[in-house]
Amino acid sequence: MPNYAKATMGTPRSHATGGRSGVKPGAILLMGLPGAGKGTQAFRLAAQFPNFVHFDTGGEIYRRVSDPHFAADPLVQEQKEIYFGGKLNTPEWVAGLVAERIHFYSDKNQGVIFSGSPRTLYEAEAILPILEECYGRERILVIEMKVSPETARERSLNRITCTKKGCRYPAHRSQGGKPCPNCGQLLPESGTQADEQWKIAQMGTRLKEYEERTQPALKFLKYELAHVHVNAEIDEESVFAKVLEAVKRNLE
């Protein structure tokens, strides 16, 4: 058995009942390789459960490092260089951003759906006690979405993202120029999106970062929490059916 130190379990801050979904607020952690479909499934879950919010850690980091208001902030500029180099940002900095948002949503009696966070063991160990404090250990579910590196690469090559900073919906390049399914803004044409092109260019680094830094975080979380794995190689609808079944089975 792994020699992980158990996180201290706190008293849940929020016991509010859910909306029409029947699922009380909690935390759903979608984990997996870049391109596994975490963002797509997170958007679908948030639409299914209106008392949950999709918190895209990568999107939050992107917004922060690309915000001109922080152009003179040396820490943010340092993180910007790391981000666009395809590497994972400084764990302490990311954990601070995430902790702030967890408390924000919990105080509003909303659950959170993470797509790919926490990304490092440090973040996992720092964030778990906060999730327990806000929701209770029994209301945290880890869903590992499993795809091969080859599938991850192919999907990343074909991905575009809504340019609206408050949306960032992930779509297929065939949808370029069409309305975003989430916010309605026209999606960018394929090949025109600089903030997606760098991800393709840095795909090898991103996969290596996942293997070396995110896998230990996932191993820790699976040891500590209820978890399931889903074959994400299949079509989107089938994946969602399995994800939805897991959430209802574990959190209703």
Image: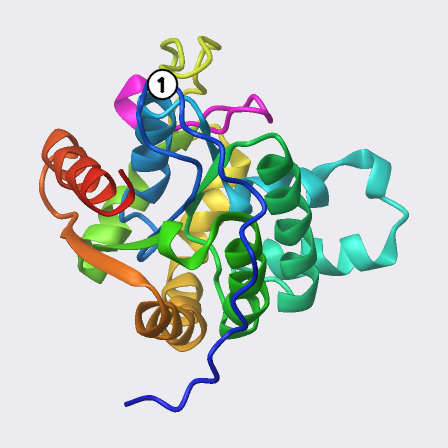
Seen in the image, is 172 located left or right of residue 127?
left
Element type at mark 1? loop
Seen in the picture, residue 120 relative to 97 is either above or below; the reply is below
Seen in the picture, residue 248 relative to 185 is either above or below; the reply is below
Looking at the picture, how far across and down is residue 194, in whole percent? 53, 37
Write down the region rendered in magenta: 162-176
Looking at the picture, how far across and down is residue 145, in whole percent? 23, 53
**Residue drawn at the location 52% of the way across and 32% of the way down:** 110
Along the line of sight, which residue is nearer the eye, 63 or 215?
Answer: 215
Classify the position of the C terminus by image quarter: top left
Res. 78 visible in picture: yes
Q: Main secondary structure of the magenta part?
A: loop
Identify residue for label 1. 176
Classify the position of the N terminus by image quarter: bottom left
Is 174 contained in the magenta span? yes
Residue type, numbered disc 1: Gly
Is 251 contained in the magenta span? no
Seen in the picture, residue 190 relative to 20 is either above or below; the reply is below
Seen in the picture, residue 31 relative to 191 is either above or below; the reply is below
**Residue drawn at the location 59% of the way across and 67% of the way down:** 126
Looking at the picture, how far across and down is residue 114, in whole percent? 44, 45
Along the line of sight, which residue is nearer the eye, 63 or 113?
Answer: 113
Looking at the picture, how far across and down is residue 93, in whole percent? 70, 61
Circle 1 residues within 10 Å: few <14, some 14–19, many ≥20 = many
**Residue drawn at the location 83% of the way across and 43% of the way down:** 70
Along the line of sight, which residue is nearer the eye, 1 or 232?
Answer: 1
Along the line of sight, which residue is nearer the eye, 169 or 163?
Answer: 169
